[in-house]
Image: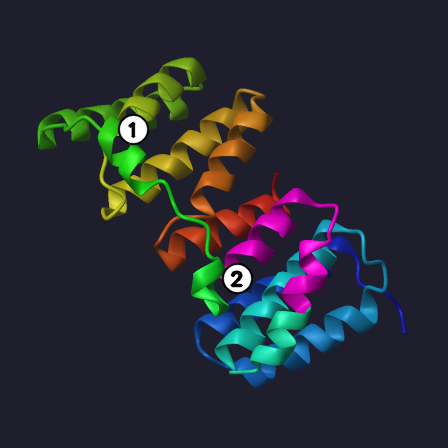
Amino acid sequence: MPRFNSAQNQELLNAIVKLLEHNNYNLALQALEKFFQNNPESNTKEYLYARVLLLDAYLYNGSFDKAINLCQELSNSKHQITQILAQRYLGEIFPETKPLEKKSSLNSTRTSLTFAQAAELLNTGYQALTKKRYQEAIRALNIFCKAASPDTNEYLKAHKLLIKAYQENGQINQAIALCQQLLLNEHEQTRRWARQLLFTDL
Protein backbone atom coordinates (compact mmCIF):
# COMPACT_ATOMS: atom_id res chain seq x y z
CA MET A 1 0.00 0.00 0.00
CA PRO A 2 1.51 3.41 -0.97
CA ARG A 3 2.39 5.73 1.88
CA PHE A 4 0.60 9.04 2.34
CA ASN A 5 2.55 12.23 1.81
CA SER A 6 2.60 14.96 4.47
CA ALA A 7 -0.33 16.91 2.98
CA GLN A 8 -2.49 13.76 2.81
CA ASN A 9 -1.57 12.90 6.39
CA GLN A 10 -2.51 16.39 7.56
CA GLU A 11 -5.82 16.20 5.73
CA LEU A 12 -6.63 12.82 7.28
CA LEU A 13 -5.64 13.97 10.79
CA ASN A 14 -7.80 17.10 10.45
CA ALA A 15 -10.73 14.90 9.35
CA ILE A 16 -10.19 12.64 12.40
CA VAL A 17 -10.23 15.68 14.72
CA LYS A 18 -13.58 16.72 13.21
CA LEU A 19 -14.98 13.20 13.66
CA LEU A 20 -13.97 13.22 17.32
CA GLU A 21 -15.51 16.67 17.82
CA HIS A 22 -18.80 15.33 16.43
CA ASN A 23 -18.67 12.14 18.56
CA ASN A 24 -18.21 9.85 15.54
CA TYR A 25 -15.81 7.58 17.42
CA ASN A 26 -16.19 4.45 15.28
CA LEU A 27 -15.47 6.38 12.08
CA ALA A 28 -12.54 8.08 13.81
CA LEU A 29 -11.14 4.68 14.82
CA GLN A 30 -11.48 3.42 11.23
CA ALA A 31 -9.71 6.53 9.89
CA LEU A 32 -6.93 6.12 12.48
CA GLU A 33 -6.48 2.50 11.44
CA LYS A 34 -6.07 3.70 7.85
CA PHE A 35 -3.55 6.29 9.01
CA PHE A 36 -1.41 3.72 10.86
CA GLN A 37 -1.49 1.34 7.87
CA ASN A 38 -0.06 4.10 5.69
CA ASN A 39 2.42 5.42 8.27
CA PRO A 40 4.49 2.61 9.76
CA GLU A 41 7.22 4.96 11.07
CA SER A 42 6.46 5.50 14.74
CA ASN A 43 8.92 8.31 15.46
CA THR A 44 7.26 11.13 13.47
CA LYS A 45 5.21 13.90 15.08
CA GLU A 46 2.28 13.01 12.80
CA TYR A 47 2.32 9.42 14.05
CA LEU A 48 2.49 10.54 17.70
CA TYR A 49 -0.37 13.00 17.13
CA ALA A 50 -2.44 10.18 15.63
CA ARG A 51 -1.70 8.08 18.77
CA VAL A 52 -2.96 10.95 20.94
CA LEU A 53 -6.12 11.16 18.81
CA LEU A 54 -6.51 7.40 19.23
CA LEU A 55 -6.36 7.98 22.98
CA ASP A 56 -9.23 10.47 22.64
CA ALA A 57 -11.26 7.95 20.65
CA TYR A 58 -10.70 5.20 23.25
CA LEU A 59 -11.56 7.44 26.19
CA TYR A 60 -14.71 8.94 24.69
CA ASN A 61 -15.79 5.52 23.43
CA GLY A 62 -15.45 4.02 26.93
CA SER A 63 -12.55 1.69 26.03
CA PHE A 64 -10.68 2.48 29.25
CA ASP A 65 -8.41 -0.61 29.23
CA LYS A 66 -7.13 0.30 25.75
CA ALA A 67 -6.79 3.94 26.81
CA ILE A 68 -4.73 2.99 29.89
CA ASN A 69 -2.44 0.72 27.86
CA LEU A 70 -1.92 3.45 25.27
CA CYS A 71 -1.26 6.04 28.01
CA GLN A 72 1.44 3.81 29.44
CA GLU A 73 2.99 3.41 25.99
CA LEU A 74 2.94 7.16 25.35
CA SER A 75 4.39 7.91 28.81
CA ASN A 76 7.60 6.24 27.59
CA SER A 77 7.79 8.38 24.46
CA LYS A 78 10.98 10.37 23.86
CA HIS A 79 8.76 13.26 22.72
CA GLN A 80 8.17 15.52 25.75
CA ILE A 81 4.77 16.82 24.61
CA THR A 82 3.50 13.26 24.22
CA GLN A 83 4.69 12.42 27.74
CA ILE A 84 2.92 15.47 29.20
CA LEU A 85 -0.31 14.53 27.42
CA ALA A 86 -0.13 10.89 28.51
CA GLN A 87 0.27 11.98 32.14
CA ARG A 88 -2.67 14.36 31.81
CA TYR A 89 -4.88 11.59 30.38
CA LEU A 90 -3.84 9.21 33.15
CA GLY A 91 -4.83 11.94 35.60
CA GLU A 92 -8.30 12.07 34.01
CA ILE A 93 -8.70 8.28 34.20
CA PHE A 94 -7.29 8.06 37.74
CA PRO A 95 -8.01 11.46 39.38
CA GLU A 96 -6.00 10.53 42.48
CA THR A 97 -2.81 10.52 40.36
CA LYS A 98 -3.55 13.86 38.72
CA PRO A 99 -0.81 16.44 39.37
CA LEU A 100 -2.07 19.49 41.21
CA GLU A 101 -2.44 22.40 38.86
CA LYS A 102 -0.93 25.59 40.18
CA LYS A 103 -4.13 27.59 39.99
CA SER A 104 -3.58 29.48 43.22
CA SER A 105 -0.11 30.72 42.29
CA LEU A 106 -1.34 31.71 38.82
CA ASN A 107 -4.31 33.60 40.21
CA SER A 108 -2.24 35.33 42.87
CA THR A 109 0.01 36.89 40.20
CA ARG A 110 -2.93 38.16 38.14
CA THR A 111 -3.59 41.85 38.19
CA SER A 112 -7.04 43.00 37.22
CA LEU A 113 -7.58 45.03 34.08
CA THR A 114 -10.53 47.24 33.33
CA PHE A 115 -12.53 46.30 30.25
CA ALA A 116 -11.04 49.32 28.41
CA GLN A 117 -7.46 48.39 29.37
CA ALA A 118 -7.97 44.78 28.30
CA ALA A 119 -9.50 45.80 24.97
CA GLU A 120 -6.68 48.28 24.33
CA LEU A 121 -3.94 45.73 25.07
CA LEU A 122 -5.56 43.11 22.87
CA ASN A 123 -6.05 45.60 20.04
CA THR A 124 -2.47 46.91 20.39
CA GLY A 125 -1.12 43.35 20.25
CA TYR A 126 -3.22 42.48 17.22
CA GLN A 127 -2.35 45.69 15.31
CA ALA A 128 1.36 45.34 16.09
CA LEU A 129 1.31 41.71 14.91
CA THR A 130 -0.35 42.61 11.59
CA LYS A 131 2.29 45.35 11.07
CA LYS A 132 5.10 42.88 11.92
CA ARG A 133 6.13 44.82 15.03
CA TYR A 134 6.56 41.58 16.94
CA GLN A 135 8.30 42.88 20.09
CA GLU A 136 5.53 45.41 20.63
CA ALA A 137 2.90 42.72 20.07
CA ILE A 138 4.63 40.35 22.51
CA ARG A 139 4.83 43.08 25.20
CA ALA A 140 1.14 44.00 24.99
CA LEU A 141 -0.13 40.43 24.71
CA ASN A 142 2.05 39.23 27.60
CA ILE A 143 0.55 41.87 29.89
CA PHE A 144 -2.94 40.89 28.76
CA CYS A 145 -2.35 37.13 29.18
CA LYS A 146 -0.95 37.54 32.70
CA ALA A 147 -3.98 39.55 33.80
CA ALA A 148 -6.86 38.01 31.84
CA SER A 149 -9.21 35.38 33.23
CA PRO A 150 -8.86 31.94 31.60
CA ASP A 151 -12.66 31.77 31.46
CA THR A 152 -12.93 34.35 28.68
CA ASN A 153 -12.80 33.91 24.90
CA GLU A 154 -10.27 36.74 24.76
CA TYR A 155 -7.85 34.67 26.88
CA LEU A 156 -7.49 32.01 24.18
CA LYS A 157 -7.48 34.62 21.40
CA ALA A 158 -4.64 36.53 23.10
CA HIS A 159 -2.62 33.33 23.59
CA LYS A 160 -3.06 32.43 19.93
CA LEU A 161 -1.85 35.89 18.90
CA LEU A 162 1.07 35.73 21.35
CA ILE A 163 2.16 32.32 20.08
CA LYS A 164 1.94 33.64 16.50
CA ALA A 165 4.05 36.67 17.47
CA TYR A 166 6.67 34.41 19.07
CA GLN A 167 6.72 32.20 15.95
CA GLU A 168 7.07 35.14 13.57
CA ASN A 169 9.79 36.65 15.76
CA GLY A 170 11.78 33.40 15.68
CA GLN A 171 11.16 32.71 19.40
CA ILE A 172 10.06 29.12 18.85
CA ASN A 173 11.04 27.96 22.35
CA GLN A 174 8.77 30.59 23.92
CA ALA A 175 5.93 29.58 21.58
CA ILE A 176 6.38 25.92 22.56
CA ALA A 177 6.55 26.76 26.29
CA LEU A 178 3.32 28.77 26.06
CA CYS A 179 1.60 25.94 24.19
CA GLN A 180 2.74 23.49 26.86
CA GLN A 181 1.11 25.66 29.54
CA LEU A 182 -2.14 25.56 27.57
CA LEU A 183 -2.04 21.73 27.53
CA LEU A 184 -2.99 21.93 31.22
CA ASN A 185 -5.78 24.47 30.72
CA GLU A 186 -9.11 23.36 32.14
CA HIS A 187 -10.95 24.15 28.91
CA GLU A 188 -10.93 21.27 26.46
CA GLN A 189 -11.11 23.49 23.36
CA THR A 190 -7.96 25.31 24.49
CA ARG A 191 -6.11 22.06 25.25
CA ARG A 192 -7.02 20.61 21.83
CA TRP A 193 -5.92 23.75 20.04
CA ALA A 194 -2.53 23.79 21.83
CA ARG A 195 -2.06 20.08 21.26
CA GLN A 196 -2.73 20.35 17.54
CA LEU A 197 -0.36 23.29 17.17
CA LEU A 198 2.45 21.51 19.03
CA PHE A 199 2.17 18.40 16.91
CA THR A 200 1.65 20.07 13.56
CA ASP A 201 3.22 23.54 13.44
CA LEU A 202 5.89 23.83 16.15
**Does residue 139 show up?**
yes
- Check the image and report above or below for 95 versus 187: below
Percent across and percent down for residue 201 are 61, 42
**Residue 16 lies within the magenta run:** no
Q: Main secondary structure of the magenta part?
A: helix
| Mark 1: amino acid | Lys
Percent across and percent down for residue 163 are 46, 33
Please name the residue shown 27% across and 38% down the image: 104
Q: In the shown orientation, is residue 143 left or right of residue 138? A: left
**Does residue 122 show up?**
no
Percent across and percent down for residue 66 are 64, 77
Q: Residues within 10 Å of mark 1 (few under 14, many from 20)?
A: some
Q: How many marks?
A: 2
Q: In the shown orientation, is residue 196 left or right of residue 21? A: right
Q: Nearer the viewer, mark 1 or mark 2?
A: 2
Percent across and percent down for residue 9 are 71, 61
**Mark 1, residue position:** 146
The outermost residue toward the front is: 96
The outermost residue toward the right is: 1
| Viewer-nearest residue: 107 or 144 | 107
**Residue 75 lies within the magenta run:** yes
Given contact means CB atoms under 8 Å apart, are the residues at marks 1 and 2 in contact? no
Q: Residues within 10 Å of mark 2 (few under 14, many from 20)?
A: many
Please name the residue shown 14% across and 27% down the image: 113
| Mark 2: amino acid | Tyr
Magenta highlight range:
70-91
- Determine which of the numbered discs, if any, sits on residue 89 in the image: 2
